[in-house]
Amino acid sequence: MDLEKINEQLKPKSAAVYNPTKRYGVMGVALGYDLHHRLQIYTRQRNLKMGQIIKILVKSYLDEMEEK
């Protein structure tokens, strides 16, 4: 195994001129089919956005954990 070659592949890419990840905190989340489907049904029934729920859950989790 060539560790130097692997490490070269792991180096971060140079920042693009327009980078939505840095600007808006965009990231991909792999929920899996079942969880994504459940969330999709829930949000459609209640006219909500999936990202809004995920954002609130992450914030609540971090707030609670940082209090400890």
Image (tube, rainbow, N blue to C red):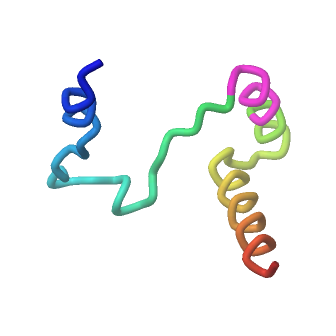
Q: Nearer the viewer, residue 53 or 10?
A: 10
- Kindly identify the residue that appears in the image at 50 percent across and 39 percent down: 28
Query: Residue 17, percent across and down?
Result: 15, 54
Query: Residue 63, percent across and down?
Result: 74, 74
Q: Overall secondary structure of the magenta stretch? A: helix
- Kindly identify the residue that appears in the image at 42 percent across and 60 percent down: 24
The residue sitting at the bottom extreme is: 67
Quadrant assignment for the N terminus: top left
Q: Nearer the viewer, residue 24 or 66?
A: 66
Query: Residue 7, percent across and down?
Result: 25, 36
Q: Nearer the viewer, residue 61 or 11?
A: 11
Left or right: where 27 falls relative to 63: left
Displayed quadrant of residue 57: bottom right
Q: Which residues are magenta?
A: 32-39
Left or right: where 9 falls relative to 50: left
Whether residue 34 appears in magenta in the rendering, the answer is yes
Quadrant assignment for the C terminus: bottom right
Q: How many numbered dots are placed on residues in this image?
A: 0
Query: Residue 33, percent across and down?
Result: 71, 20
- Kindly identify the residue that appears in the image at 19 percent across and 53 percent down: 15
Q: Is 18 placed above or below 5 here?
A: below
Displayed quadrant of residue 5: top left
Q: Is 10 placed above or below 52 here?
A: above
Q: Is 34 placed above or below 41 here?
A: above
- Kindly identify the residue that appears in the image at 74 percent across and 49 percent down: 48
Whether residue 26 appears in magenta in the rendering, the answer is no
